[in-house]
Image (tube, rainbow, N blue to C red):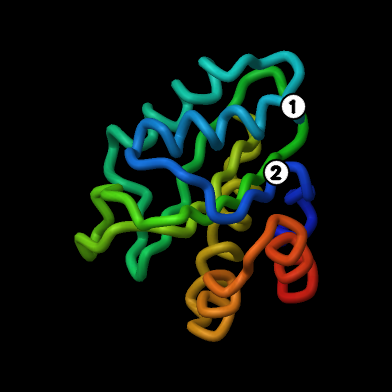
Amino acid sequence: MQLSEILTSNCTSCDVDVTSKKRILEKICQLAAVHVPDIDEDELLTSLLEREKMGSTGIGNGIAIPHGRLPNTSKAVAVLITTETAINFDAIDNRDVDIFIALFVPENSCQEHLDTLQNIAKLFSDKKIIKQVRKCIDDQSLYKLIQQTS
């Protein structure tokens, strides 16, 4: 599944002012909760934190792909946030992160989860795309960029 298929405009946020890993994960969950009515923000956060305990989802180059599996849901939800300033996210290259692409998938959709993560990683391995994402100045331009490129 492509990012453009599961990302909505109200789950896209540009230049968010957060200063810690916990706060960015909370912001991600706040946005995603609108699209997962049977699961509250705390459960969403728990799913992300459980995954982070296994190892940081900071993939390098200032990018992180936090993700979690959710019970009792049938659709995947994505959240895209860029931050005003990069924050420490324990990324594999030790660089701070300013682009967060979060993914929540149904618990029983293992292959879909892996395929979607792979597509997101591939999209954000393109330095041109990364540069364009960082140049976006508002939520709508960021959302439109993803819709056009993925």
The image quadrant that residue 91 belongs to is bottom left
Q: Position of residue 119 (x, y in %)?
A: 60, 65
Q: Taking 16 as reference, is 10 left or right?
A: right
Above or below, 36 relative to 128: above
- Quarter that holds the C terminus: bottom right
Marks 1 and 2, how far apart at CA: 9 Å
Query: Which residue has dot 2 on it?
Result: 11
Q: Badge 1: few (under 14), some or many (20 or more) residues near its Cα, within 10 Å?
A: some
User: Is disc 2 placed on a helix, strand or loop?
Assistant: strand
Query: Which residue has dot 1 on it?
Result: 34
Q: Residue at x 78, y 49 (%)?
A: 9
Q: Position of residue 14 (x, y in %)?
A: 60, 55
Q: Position of residue 95 (x, y in %)?
A: 25, 63
Of the pair 100 and 92, the residue shown nearer to us: 100
In the image, farthest residue toward the bottom: 128
Above or below, 21 relative to 70: below
Q: Amino acid at mark 2?
A: Cys
Q: Taking 56 as reference, is 98 left or right?
A: right
Q: Earlier in the sequence, mark 1 or mark 2?
A: 2
